[in-house]
Amino acid sequence: MSVKALFDLTGQVALITGGSRGLGLQMAEALGELGAKLAITARKADELAEAKTHLEGMGYEVLTVVNDLQKLDQIPAMVDQVVSHYGTIDILVNNAGATWGAKAEEYPDEAWHKVMGLNVDAPFFLSREVGRRCMIPQGHGNIIVTASVAGLKGTPPGMNTIAYNTSKAAAIHFAKTLASEWGHYGIRVNAICPGFFPTKLASGLIDKLGDTLVARTPLRRLGGDEDLKGTVAFLASNASRHITGQAIVVDGGASVI
């Protein structure tokens, strides 16, 4: 098989949560370019409509589903919509996430539960739903979790993101454990660990610490609009068919120093 054929996703269905903007939209662009049929979800209908217009303008087939993943009981209905439209789900990108900045001793209960709910609970319940309804019966599937370099170590003083870091460490181990459990079904599970990208989620810290972050990065740059495309294309395709349970860091080298 040619290398080009290994990356071909023609006819596969990819569900990307948080797919209306930022990293999710970037990954949707990449999977669409490789031939995948796209389903993107987010809370805000207007942002989804804008993303749909953008992706369809690039020539990709797109279904949008308005959904709040913090409401876990709505997950089956969301999967229903995608399966009713496309027939199955082959690729699941658990990308939606949240953060909250506060000192640990002052961290609000509701903030902790919000971050954990969206970053840990939702990927599990959605993966379980897609796994048992689509991937396990069909004997193949590919789950990708957007984790973070924040899940690999603590943060510098003053960053105050204890729930986010904890949740992203959980996301990495969720991917490793699910990969171990579901490998015999032909399902692969991997995590992507981005560093700092100029997204809405990270904008506050970048505004505050941008120059320092760049100075601490060997490549002397933050992540850009193209920098996750190759990684998600690799992990979603047969180019990585013998890779599962891994966490790939995309941070310009910041985590190695």
Image: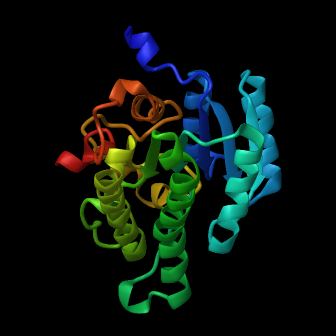
Does residue 122 appear to the left or right of 163 in the view shown? right
Numbered disc total: 0
Instruction: Say if 208 sits above or below 7 in the image.
Output: below
Instruction: Say if 108 sits above or below 130 in the image.
Output: below
Does residue 32 appear to the left or right of 100 in the view shown? right
On the image, the x and y values in percent for residue 41 come to 69, 52
Question: For this rendering, which residue is in front, 28 or 111?
Answer: 28
Q: Residue visible at 30% across and 61% down?
A: 173
Question: For this rendering, which residue is in front, 190 or 146?
Answer: 190
Residue at the extreme front of the image, as rendered: 137
On the image, the x and y values in percent for residue 193 come to 36, 49
Does residue 201 appear to the left or right of 245 in the view shown? right
Q: Is residue 39 visible?
A: yes
On the image, the x and y values in percent for residue 216 come to 26, 48
Q: Residue visible at 77% across and 38% down?
A: 52
Instruction: Say if 16 sits above or below 154 in the image.
Output: above
Q: Can residue 189 be seen in this view?
A: no
Q: Residue visible at 42% across and 69% down?
A: 164
